[in-house]
């Protein structure tokens, strides 16, 4: 664990109503880790706690929410009990974040140069003119043509794709160690999306940057990520290397997600949709939170929530089916089961 | 068809050059600005421009009509008032009072209101509660009565009038600005600034304040009229600018008695002055609003 760039250990963040009667477990006992230069994809449907998790790492939860447990180790420091003033020096400087909407992410009243240079002025005390010069370089690095001209323009003079790159340049300005991208491409069209993803990969390679990619697009995960964490109802239900999770999903939810992607190569009649709704996070069922929708659920799932089973190093799932003992009975060929049968 | 375009490279070399470019004379309200400049010029050089002393009249020459009316003379271009003071001279000196009182009071009200509105809207919580409850209480007080009450306590003087008007009218700014801030706070660029590690104060200064300034300026142009009229009312009631001093509102108030018996010039001329000043300020404010908004500025 010592060489990990970021590791979350049993992190929980809950929203508590004013009377304290309603508790919404937006992020519940999340354990994740990320090496320098690695890309982690976090997928899950809307409301599964992906964005809340990102805000938890940056300690930017809304007033009603708080981190109720766990440790967030970043470069050897625990971010959970860092004083607010120090935390501010982490944001934008060591951990940067890209928000969803490129159209609205820029202040309409300031030039691109002022905005790209802002983190430099805030964190490194750069003068306006030196920040301006570095902004030109940054704009060039996100492959925008004629940066000398663009730097002095206003956001409304740019296209959506350019604005998104500018937002990327703002994120990169202080050379952070970790960049969190919260659905950065949802509002871009497909060709621009692809270009933007290429750009992010290139920036990642040249800067040795770790990337957390929050998305509900599994295609992007396949293209971009090394590690994958699947979130459901505030919990990470399955995680592991992308290739392993894609080829051999352990959790029925992951299987269902993978089954719901349209593929050109297969001649399937229908896409598999997942029936039912995610549970109310303020009123989680006693057992596994996916049990009600799970095609493979059995009696134990209704009464007891599965812990996080480590299946192989770096690969785990919160499902009874992944438990070492039960695993044998359902899975194809495991020597243990054969010897037990004979 | 040939279209002449400025080369993009020349358009923007430095931030300063860019800022200058914003002020191209495009839809510039020339006449209102000239009127305001004229009023300002007259206010500054009143001592040299006024033909008579505005505070000393001669009872022998009272109620002289303007020069072009029967009985008028070139000696008193716009006539004289009930104690024989030259109306033109009083208007010239009155410009100074109206300019100083009107603009400063609007600035004071705008400053207090904008500051409190931003704090209230951005910080929220108990700060918001306290500021908004005070604002509610303030708005519940009848403005003019409240102003008279304050004037009665501190006594009439130009400085006091400015403070009183500022103290009475800041609430409208606070309300409008707070509303703007509440919606700005949700905007993605403010969230990005938070994520980038900007402090609350920096965000309020750099991202919130410039974005509420448009509304504040538009409100200021409207408030200028209200403030000048309130100043006139206070003067009329004897708690405004102390009487021998010429203020347009005071002149109108004095002239009101003469209006019924045909001495129209005593009220009409200061009335026209107030109207021109307020109208010009409104038109200038409208232009500024468009100029300050990059969305509207684009061609």
Image: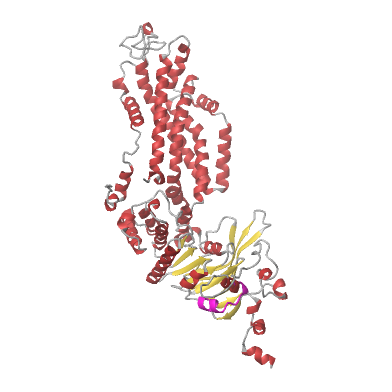
Magenta region, residue range: A241-253
Relative to A193, residue B56 above or below = above
Q: Which quarter of the figure has residue B139?
A: top right
Question: Relative to B79, is B258 on the left or the right?
Answer: right
Q: Is residue A127 visible?
A: no
- Relative to the observer, which residue lies in front, A81 or A105? A105
Q: Is residue A87 visible?
A: yes
Question: Relative to A268, is B44 on the left or the right?
Answer: left
Could you say where residue A229 lies in the image, as x and y percent from the top left? 54, 71
Q: Which quarter of the figure has residue A163?
A: bottom left
Relative to A154, residue A192 above or below = below
Quadrant the C terminus of chain B occupies = top left
Predominant SS along the magenta part = helix
Residue closest to the far bottom: A342
Question: Relative to A270, is B1 on the left or the right?
Answer: left
- Relative to the observer, which residue lies in front, B193 or B150? B193
Residue name at image x 32 percent, y 23 percent: B46
Count of labels in the image: 0
Relative to B155, residue B212 above or below = below
Could you say where residue B260 lies in the image, as x and y percent from the top left? 48, 11
Residue name at image x 65 percent, y 67 percent: A275
Q: Does the segment drawn in magenta span residue A249?
A: yes
Could you say where residue B80 lies in the image, as x and y percent from the top left? 37, 12
Q: Does the segment drawn in magenta span residue A192?
A: no
Relative to B2, residue A301 above or below = below
Question: Which color scheme is applied?
Answer: secondary structure
């Amino acid at each position: 664990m010592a060489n990990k760039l970021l590791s979350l250990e049993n992190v929980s963040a809950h929203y508590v109503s004013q009377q304290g009667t309603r508790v919404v477990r937006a992020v519940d006992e999340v354990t994740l880790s990320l090496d320098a230069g690695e890309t982690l994809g976090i997928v899950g449907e809307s409301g599964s706690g992906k964005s809340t998790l990102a805000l938890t790492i940056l300690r930017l939860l809304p007033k009603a929410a708080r981190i109720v447990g766990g440790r967030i180790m970043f470069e050897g420091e625990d971010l959970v009990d860092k004083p607010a003033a120090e935390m501010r020096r982490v944001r934008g400087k060591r951990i940067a974040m890209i928000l969803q909407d490129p159209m609205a992410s820029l202040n309409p009243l300031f030039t691109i140069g002022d905005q790209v240079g802002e983190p430099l002025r805030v964190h490194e005390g750069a003068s306006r003119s030196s920040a301006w010069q570095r902004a030109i370089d940054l704009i060039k690095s996100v492959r925008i043509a004629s940066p000398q001209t663009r730097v002095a323009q206003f956001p409304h003079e740019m296209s959506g794709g350019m604005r998104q790159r500018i937002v990327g340049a703002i994120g990169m300005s202080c050379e952070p160690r970790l960049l969190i991208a919260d659905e950065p491409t949802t509002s871009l069209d497909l060709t621009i999306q692809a270009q933007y993803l290429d750009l992010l990969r290139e920036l990642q390679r040249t800067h040795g940057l770790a990337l957390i990619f929050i998305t509900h697009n599994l295609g992007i995960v396949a293209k971009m990520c090394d590690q994958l964490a699947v979130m459901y109802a505030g919990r990470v239900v399955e995680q592991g290397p992308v290739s392993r999770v894609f080829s051999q999903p352990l959790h029925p939810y992951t299987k269902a997600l993978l089954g719901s992607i349209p593929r050109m190569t297969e001649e399937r009649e229908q896409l598999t949709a997942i029936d039912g709704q995610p549970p109310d996070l303020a009123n989680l069922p006693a057992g596994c939170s996916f049990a009600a929708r799970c095609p493979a659920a059995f009696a134990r799932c209704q009464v007891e929530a599965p812990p996080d089973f480590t299946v192989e190093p770096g690969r785990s799932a919160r499902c009874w089916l992944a438990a070492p003992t039960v695993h044998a009975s359902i899975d194809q060929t495991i020597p243990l089961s054969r010897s037990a049968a004979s | 068809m040939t279209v002449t375009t400025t080369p993009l490279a020349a358009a923007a070399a430095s931030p300063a050059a860019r800022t200058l470019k914003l002020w191209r004379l495009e839809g510039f309200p020339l006449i209102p600005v000239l009127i305001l400049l004229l009023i300002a010029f007259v206010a500054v050089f009143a001592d040299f421009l006024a033909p008579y002393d505005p505070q000393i009249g001669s009872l022998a020459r009272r109620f002289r009509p303007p020069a072009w009316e029967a009985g008028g003379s070139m000696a008193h271009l716009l006539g004289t008032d009930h104690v024989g003071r030259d109306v033109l001279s009083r208007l010239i000196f009155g410009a100074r009072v109206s300019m100083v009182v009107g603009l400063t009071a609007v600035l004071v009200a705008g400053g207090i209101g904008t500051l409190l509105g931003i704090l209230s809207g951005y910080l929220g919580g108990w700060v918001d509660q306290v500021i908004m409850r005070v604002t509610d209480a303030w708005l519940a007080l009848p403005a003019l009565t409240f102003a008279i009450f304050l004037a009665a306590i501190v006594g009439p003087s130009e400085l006091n009038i400015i403070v009183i008007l500022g103290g009475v009218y800041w609430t409208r700014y606070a309300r409008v600005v707070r509303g703007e801030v509440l919606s700005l706070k949700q905007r993605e660029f403010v969230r990005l600034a938070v994520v980038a590690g900007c402090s609350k104060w920096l965000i309020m200064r750099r991202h919130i304040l410039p974005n509420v300034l448009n509304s504040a300026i538009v409100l200021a142009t409207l408030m200028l009229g209200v403030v000048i009229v309130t100043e006139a009312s206070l003067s009329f009631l004897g708690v405004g600018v102390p009487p021998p001093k010429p203020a347009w509102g005071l002149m109108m108030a004095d002239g009101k008695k003469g209006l019924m018996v045909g001495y129209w010039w005593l009220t009409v001329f200061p009335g026209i002055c107030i109207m021109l000043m307020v109208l010009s300020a409104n038109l200038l404010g409208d232009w500024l609003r468009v100029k300050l908004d990059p969305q509207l500025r684009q061609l």
